[in-house]
Amino acid sequence: MEMMGTFNPFGPSGGGGGGGTPGRDGADGIGISSITFVSSSAGGAAGQPNATDTYKIEYTDGNSTTFKVTNGTTGAKGDKGDKGDKGDTGDAFTYDDFTPEQLNDLTGPQGPAGQNGTNGTDGISITGATITDGHLILTLSSGSTIDAGTAVGPTGPQGP
């Protein structure tokens, strides 16, 4: 089987022109100054699945137009990504980190009063004190005594 050459519907290339003069510059075009979201058929924010959003284009010549974008459905859930690097250790909470509203949420209502506890045993008190042979003797409410040691020191030197 014999292969045929390529077919060119426009024919062979010409030999080139004689180098004519360049054409003049064209008029400046119109630019876009802004594109803003106008509304959504779903109400609320732009980009909701299965909704049609309307946007407005403002041109640099003062004119404007609107266009519509039909949003698709939410895609299937993707594969789980790789585990990220361990983050820095955070600082502990302080009282100042919370707003008054958060602090109120941390405090629950006051609970009911608790039951009175049982009375403790009576303590032992000092009921008397005497100095005997230079010692301080304390008498206690339990009837026992304590020798608290020397209460009278030696006689001091004669003063001037």
Image: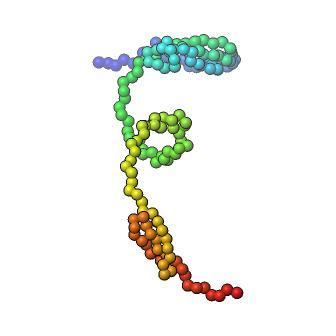
Residue nearer the viewer, 49 or 24: 49
The residue sitting at 40% across, 69% down in the picture is 144
Residue 28 at what x, y percent from top left?
Answer: 68, 18
Q: Quadrant of residue 139?
A: bottom left
Residue sitting at the far left: 1
- The image's colouring method is rainbow
Residue 139 seen in the figure = yes
Quadrant where the C terminus sits is: bottom right
User: Eyeballing the image, is 110 above or below 126?
Assistant: above
The residue sitting at 53% across, 44% down in the picture is 95
Quadrant where the N terminus sits is: top left
Residue 54 at what x, y percent from top left?
Answer: 54, 14
Q: Quadrant of residue 152?
A: bottom right
User: Eyeballing the image, is 158 above or below 43?
Assistant: below
Residue nearer the viewer, 110 or 74: 110
The residue sitting at 49% across, 12% down in the picture is 41
Residue nearer the viewer, 48 or 16: 48
Residue 76 at what x, y percent from top left?
Answer: 36, 24
**How many marks overall?**
0
The residue sitting at 48% across, 68% down in the picture is 128
Residue 116 at what x, y percent from top left?
Answer: 40, 45
Q: Judge left or right: residue 28 versus residue 41.
A: right
Residue nearer the viewer, 51 or 151: 151
User: Eyeballing the image, is 18 above or below 93?
Assistant: above
Q: Judge left or right: residue 48 versus residue 121.
A: right
Residue 29 seen in the figure = no
